[in-house]
Amino acid sequence: MIHLKRARPEEASVLTAIQKESFDRECTRYGQEEQGGPPGYAEEAWQLAMMQDMHYFAILEGEEETAEGDRLDRLIGGAIVSENAAAGICHLGRIFLHPDKQGSGMGKVAMLALEQQYPDAIRWELDTPDWALRNHRFYPSCGYRKVNEANGFYYYAKDKSPSPPDRG
């Protein structure tokens, strides 16, 4: 079982390590070692700044806990979202799972859980490097469609129906 919680500052070092391993492995897989991962991916200070400025979620494996003490042992990834609530648009800045968890279906479950955090969003947007071939299979499998290619990136979007009004 996968669930999301807002990331906490004490998790920044673990999130940094997971993110670094995940993106470094992808760069190696596609011969992009010199490029490295996205900005700030290997910097704990950047993670802390994103926790302040964006919606940064920890992706946790297992049953939801009642005590906060065991989160670090079950932390398997993270996701960063920015929201323009007035326009109903969410931008997925980043999602990552520990490499040992990739290809298990957990990424798809995490994407769905992330989208459910924003029931009023009518559109999701994201971008990914053109060389990240696994991402070009993953995002469409989650319902995203490629809407543009430019400057070494593919841009994806997913349009959703707005939540029906509560008639309770």
Image (tube, rainbow, N blue to C red):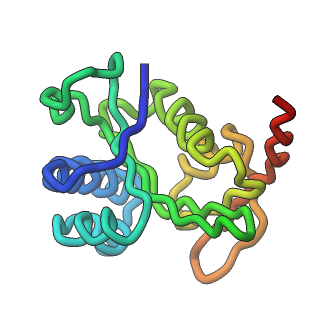
Q: In which quarter of the image is the N terminus?
A: top left
In terms of image quadrants, where is residue 137? top right
* 19 up-or-down from 93: above or below: above
Q: Quadrant of the C terminus?
A: top right
Nearest the viewer among 78 and 141 is 78
Residue 57, image x, y percentages:
39, 48
Nearest the viewer among 73 and 156 is 73
Residue 17 appears in the rendering: yes
Nearest the viewer among 103 and 142 is 142
Q: Residue at x 56, y 43 (%)?
A: 117
Residue 145, image x, y percentages:
77, 54
Q: Which residue is drawn at 51% across and 57% down?
A: 132
- In the picture, measured across the screen, residue 94 lies left or right of residue 71, that is right
Residue 33 appears in the rendering: no
Residue 52, image x, y percentages:
31, 68
Residue 115, image x, y percentages:
61, 44
- In the picture, measured across the screen, residue 1 lies left or right of residue 100, that is right
* 72 up-or-down from 105: above or below: below
- In the picture, measured across the screen, residue 12 lies left or right of residue 96, that is left
Q: Which residue is drawn at 28% across and 21% down?
A: 65
